[in-house]
Image: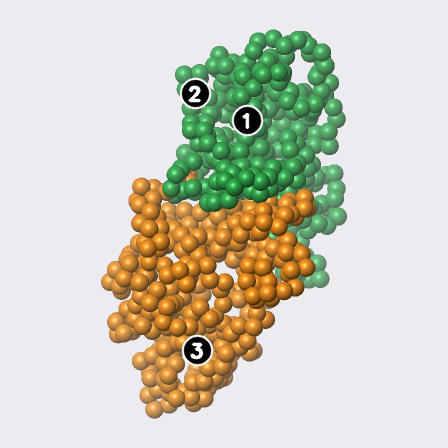
Chain colours: A orange, B green
Amino acid sequence: MDLRDTADEASFRGELRSWIEENLPEELQGHRGGAARFEGEAMRAWSRALHDGGYAGLTWPKEYGGSGAAYTHQAIFLEEMARAEAPPHIGVIGLGMAGPTIMAHGSEDHKERYLEPILSADEIWCQGFSEPGAGSDLAGVRTSARQENGHFVVDGQKVWSSFAHLASFCILLTRSDPVSTRHAGLTYLIVDMHSPGVEVRPLTQITGEAEFNEIFFDGVEVPAENLLGEIGGGWQVAMTTLLHERGTLGFALQAALEVQVRKLAALARDRGADPLQRDRIAREWIEMQALRFTNYGSLSKLVKTGTPGPEGSISKLVWSEANQRVTKLALELLGPDAALAEENAPYGGYWQHQQLRSRGNTIEAGTSEVLRNIVAERVLGLPKSR
Amino acid sequence: MDFTFTPEQDALREQARAFLSDHPEPSWKQLAALGWTGVSIAEENGGAGLTFVEEAVLYEELGRALYKGPFFSTVAVTLPALPDDLRAEVAAGEASWTLAFGPLVPDLDTADRIAIVGGDGIYELEGAEREVLSTSDETRPVGVVRGGEPGRRLADAGVLEEIRNRTLAALAIESCGVARRALEYAIEHARTREQFGKPIGVYQAVSHPLADGYTRLELARSLSLWAAWCVAQETAQPGEQAAIASAAAKAFASEAAVQVCETSIQVHGGIGFTWEHVLHRLYKRALWIESFAASSSTLRAEIAASLLETTSPSGLSQTPVSLTQGG
């Protein structure tokens, strides 16, 4: 047990810190989240800079254009980026989900064609998993992929798809066997978002922004070579994608929470807090620290054994509920000013926006209900509830 | 960065769990023979020369086993005040100690000798009358001392800071041992107890509180091990991390342990409410820990003060553990 950086980790952290300081454009720092920041050339340029600096795809193997770095470096990268309030590489879905899935299940041609442009931010990816009838229960997917004249024809609707309006490609989970049910008969495809018959419609959320989209597929032709894995083997491929979604995500979440708690403390110093509010601020600081060391424990086991510790499965659950409490407490500290919005509100409406956005945290990427089931069944070994 | 135990620390845990399972009421001599009483005492004083992290492994297992005896009061609390010759006696199993730093003195029924805080120093208390009081946790008695005279001066009062940190960190990790066992009973019960034709763990009204209990416990344990590491580091290299870490760990872990025990009692239904089941003993230990030394709300008030009242308090407003600078 040694919580200090090793010499190698310390030098990586030091270089990264200076690199961010020198390269992060001021207008991209301290963003308040949301969709708008991904529009425009600045984010692409920032992502390309990350790539040129060797920070895109840190843990990707060198043969695919990554840095082949240790998981600890990835964790440090996520911590430092969050602490500097730097926006992520725009290829969030490509780097974290599509890329690793292509590496695991794709052909050499797939790897050659798709991986490099993800790193360089020349091509953005989106994910087409959830549907109006298939949310937490992903095996209910109904979007169909019919085999016809050596290609697939896709019809259906996907929802909650971030980046779809900017994306070149979509990783799409379809039902290729119309008489199949549940996990069988699913097929995983790569779909060119510029194909005829693809329509993207933004979904405006409770913050007033549109981070997510609906995607409609109407007779979209997808070449046979865009298949990932086997026909009918889509569920296994999708599990690879979701595994990577949860990977080292905990570090980014904890570091973001640390920034929030720091801002909460600053807010309390600015505007005052009564003894009960002070007690709750201390609670949030303690829980943020607890999350940090829980992530360290899980990562250390991953580094030592190749498998993350089971405690890693609680990161997203803990973070999402903590972020909701922290942002709500901030509104309480604002008093009547909490009713104001945007430029009329203190701090440009930062806390009002953050609080509303936080309600999505316990829904996106696995609802808290599903995550509690996962802990109960896979970690505690309780019998399955369904 | 490495937040795992060494193979030697894992082996110590296995030894402790096996021994305490075979010997639920070990004597002080037996613990000394295992090398536990001197685990962090220097080798030249007859100890094993290890750190507070190894002590933490033992506190967790002793808590799990609901050990009754003066280990906490001697090793966690009084040890920093003892001069070398008296440490050697502890390592050899010849003496156990407790420290009167508040009106209620822990382990007063079993500790051989008593130290007392007076003025700018810590002294041995000689010739005092002891009254052991009844406690709801029968495995962790407390008492009051009356009369007596200060004898040998043991240490300067400056050592009280270290004693406070060790006490809080030890109680935090001990409560994790208590909670783990309570959670294991609940999981086993939820897997095997059937109602309405199904194991009750199928019902999310049962399984989700257990998932929450596991979550609180993992968070508590992470904080407690952080605190243990900081205390171990601080012995060699003083800083300010141990004070904050041990306060945070005790505040969170003691509440988590009480919550996990309460969930476990509820999941067990009627049997969890009986004297016969061990759960109430675990619960009473958790409640004892929550009440002792400093309450969670007091500790949080201290943390809030350091977060909010100064601009640069122990690095609190910045990265609390600076990984680049070390502990």
Residue A160: give its label. Answer: none
Query: Is residue B160 depicted above or below A341 in this figure?
Result: above
**Residue at 63% in and 10% down:** B150
Q: Do the residues bearing badges 3 and 2 touch, measured as CB atoms within 8 Å?
A: no
- The residue nearer to you, when weighing B156 against B307, is B307
- The residue nearer to you, when weighing B315 against B155, is B315
Mark 1 element type: helix
**Residue at 63% in and 45% down:** A278
Q: Residue furthest front?
A: A344
Query: Is residue B178 depicted above or below A294 in this figure?
Result: above
Viewport quadrant of the N terminus of chain A: top left
**Residue at 43% in and 85% down:** A198
Residues beneath discs 3 and 2 located on the same chain: no
Asked whether residue B40 is in view, the answer is yes
Mark 3 is surrounded, within 10 Å at the Cα level, by few (under 14), some (14 to 19) or many (20 or more) other residues, namely many
Q: Depth-wise, is mark 1 or mark 2 nearer the camera?
A: 1
Amino acid residing under circle 2: Ala
Amino acid residing under circle 3: His
- The residue nearer to you, when weighing A41 against B235, is A41
> Circle 3 sits on which residue?
A165
Mark 3 element type: loop
Q: CA distance from mark 1 to mark 2?
A: 20 Å
Asked whether residue B215 is in view, the answer is no
| Chain ID at mark 2 | B
Residue B161: give its label. Answer: 1
Viewport quadrant of the C terminus of chain A: bottom right
Q: Depth-wise, is mark 3 or mark 2 nearer the camera?
A: 3
